[in-house]
């Protein structure tokens, strides 16, 4: 894979020339020090990649000539993450790791034990930062698919209205939580086909409250144990996504 990657969402279906915006141009030319003649892979975030030659190494408006295009197949399984919003910049880190693992969509949710409360303007700024974190991670790891990052929403309405999935999981410290392997086996047997769309819900520090767990279970979520140790939410998210991705790939 060439050293240089950049993001662009052109309006043309089969562009011959790509023009990067100021942010992408600066990152490619000033930060990564790409020079004219360099090979650059430009991706759309929707599976399309263009193998290009950098023809104008401008820090504000880089221009690239398209050599050829290619389309990457999506992963055979679609994993979604619903994550209770943690303090500080931790959610940005979670977004980065989820993008590297291949999550298709990310739902930030506000739970009863969430200690961060954002107004509309702060939510918009945070969403921009989360989108930037996903883009940076995709460029770093070579993922041509950007996850869809949804708007922040309260946990109870999210559990009650979340869309259709083959399986909905919720990490739980509460008694009665099952192992991931056993639940996957049960659901796959009942579906009689490989699982393709799975949602993981990860709580805040201290886990979801009993009432939130009750709402989730009523909405069809399966409580899953992540082992005997209490994990920080960012560790739980990475662990849960990684194990689930591995198990689904082994179907």
Image (cartoon, helix red, strand yellow):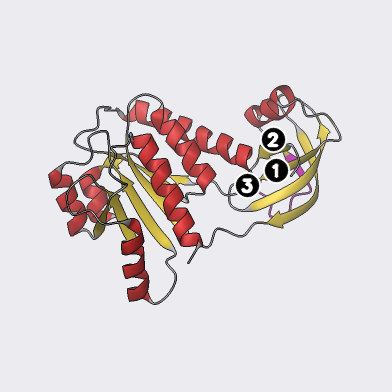
Q: Is residue 17 left or right of residue 82?
A: right
Furthest residue in direction right, as rendered = 37
Q: Are marks 2 and 1 in contact (CB under 8 Å)?
A: yes
Label whose residue precedes the other's in the sequence (2 or 3): 2
Q: Are marks 3 and 1 in contact (CB under 8 Å)?
A: yes
x then y, percent, for residue 32: 72, 27
Q: Is residue 130 left or right of residue 205?
A: right
Circle 2 sits in a helix, a strand or a loop, which is it? loop
Q: Quadrant of the N terminus?
A: top right
Q: Are marks 2 and 3 in contact (CB under 8 Å)?
A: no
**Residue 17 or 95: which is nearer the viewer?**
95
Q: Is residue 240 above or below residue 78?
A: above
In magenta, the rendered stretch is 10-18
Which residue occupies 50% across, 37% down? 96
Circle 3 sits in a helix, a strand or a loop, which is it? loop
Within-10-Å neighbours for mark 1: few <14, some 14–19, many 20+: many
Which residue occupies 21% across, 58% down? 219
Q: Main secondary structure of the magenta part?
A: loop
Q: Name the residue tied to disc 2.
A: 20
Within-10-Å neighbours for mark 2: few <14, some 14–19, many 20+: many
Q: Name the residue tied to disc 1.
A: 42
x then y, percent, for residue 24: 65, 31
Q: Name the residue tied to disc 3.
A: 44
Measured Cα–Cα span from mark 3 to mark 1: 7 Å
Q: Is residue 72 above or below residue 3?
A: below
x then y, percent, for residue 164: 34, 62
Note whether residue 199 is visible. Answer: yes
Circle 1 sits in a helix, a strand or a loop, which is it? strand
**Residue 23 or 218: which is nearer the viewer?**
218
């Amino acid at each position: 894979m060439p050293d240089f990657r950049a993001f662009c969402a052109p309006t043309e279906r089969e562009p011959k020339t790509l023009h990067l915006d100021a942010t992408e141009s600066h990152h490619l030319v000033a930060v990564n020090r790409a020079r004219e003649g360099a090979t650059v892979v430009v991706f759309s975030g929707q599976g399309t990649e263009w193998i290009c030659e950098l023809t104008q190494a401008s820090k504000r408006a880089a221009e690239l000539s398209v050599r050829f295009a290619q389309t990457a197949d999506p992963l055979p399984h679609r994993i979604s993450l619903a994550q209770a919003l943690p303090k500080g910049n931790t959610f940005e880190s979670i977004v980065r790791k989820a993008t590297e693992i291949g999550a298709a969509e990310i739902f930030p949710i506000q739970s009863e034990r969430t200690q961060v409360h954002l107004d509309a303007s702060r939510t918009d700024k945070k969403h921009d930062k989360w989108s930037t974190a996903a883009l940076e991670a995709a460029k770093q790891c070579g993922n041509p698919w950007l996850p869809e990052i949804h708007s922040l929403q309260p946990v109870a309405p999210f559990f009650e209205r979340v869309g259709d999935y083959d399986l909905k999981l919720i990490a739980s410290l509460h008694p009665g939580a099952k192992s991931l392997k056993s639940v996957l086996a049960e659901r796959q047997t009942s579906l009689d086909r490989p699982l393709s769309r799975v949602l993981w819900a990860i709580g805040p520090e201290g886990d979801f409250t009993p009432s939130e767990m009750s709402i989730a279970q009523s909405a069809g979520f399966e409580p899953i144990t992540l082992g005997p140790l209490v994990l920080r939410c960012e560790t739980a998210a990475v662990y849960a996504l990684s194990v689930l991705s591995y198990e689904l790939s082994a179907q």
